Amino acid sequence: MVTSTPTTHAQRSSSSASVTTAQTLAQEWFLSNFDDNETQLAAGVNSALKNVTTSDVMCYGTPSIQRRTNEASPNGGCPAIYTSVNASCSCLTSGYSDSDTWEFHVTLRTDKDSAKYPTTLSSTDILSIDSIRTLLVPSNLTTLIIIGEGVYPQTITFVSQDQSLPGSTLPIAKTVDGTIGVTTV
């Protein structure tokens, strides 16, 4: 579910003396759904993460670029529970709240893009990614536009929210309650 917050911004990591069971499960989910050095476009809170607090939801559920890598230090844009497992988050700060249309400009990530992980991006930025995880969208979203940028066709893959669960359905977008209003992709 995507929720509106007073201001959408990158979350800052902060250390905590103890980790809750929900946080441990969130870390395990993250590690099992990201390959090392993988960057995903994602939005919303997966059902496996329903028990984490709002402050532990990446980018408060708004669209974001999420990366896991052991090759570089995390950018500090994710909650601490994810930063501790080498996650970086770039929150998309404009163009997605209170809108019935979401538009993303994407390109396949290259090695030269590996150092470019600011904590915030805008809807006009070209997003360098490896894959698009099933987007959890608000029920009022009617149009989803994904534009491949560059000279050549993009070979970006789509991945499910829970890659370890068997199944043949791979929706591009869905709502938490299953009622989708997207009529144009």
Image (tube, rainbow, N blue to C red):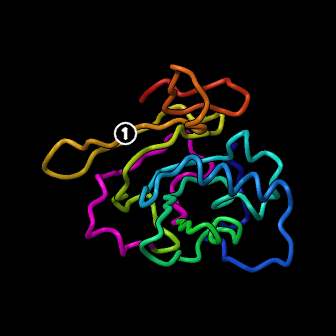
Q: Badge 1, how many Cα within 10 Å: few under 14, some, many 20+?
A: few
**Residue at (55, 53) in percent of width and height:** 63
Image location (x, y in percent) of residue 93: 55, 64
> What residue type is disc 1 on?
Thr
Please provide percent x and percent y for residue 109: 31, 58
- Position of 126 with respect to 178 (left or right) is left
The residue under the point 27% across, 66% down is 111
Residue that label 1 marks: 157
Number of marks drawn = 1
Compared to 13, does 52 lie above or below? above
Which quadrant of the figure contains the C terminus?
top left
Q: Where's residue 67, x and y in %?
A: 49, 61
Displayed quadrant of residue 116: bottom left
Res. 7 image quadrant: bottom right
| 158 in relation to 90, above or below | above
Quick check: can you spot residue 9?
A: no
Image quadrant for the N terminus? top right
| Location of residue 181 in the rendering, given as x and y in whole percent from the top left corner | 59, 26
Q: Which residue occupies the extreme left position in the image? A: 151
- On screen, residue 48 versus residue 64, left or right, reads right
The residue depicted at 75 percent of the width and 51 percent of the height is: 25
Relative to 20, 56 lies left or right: left
Query: Farthest residue toward the top?
Result: 168
Q: Secondary structure at mark 1?
A: strand
- Which residue is found at the position 56% from the left and 66% from the top? 87
24 with respect to 78 (left or right): right
Please state which of residues 118 and 160 is positioned toward the viewer in this rendering. 160
Q: Which residues are magenta?
A: 90-117
Q: Is residue 87 visible?
A: yes
The answer to whether residue 106 is magenta is yes
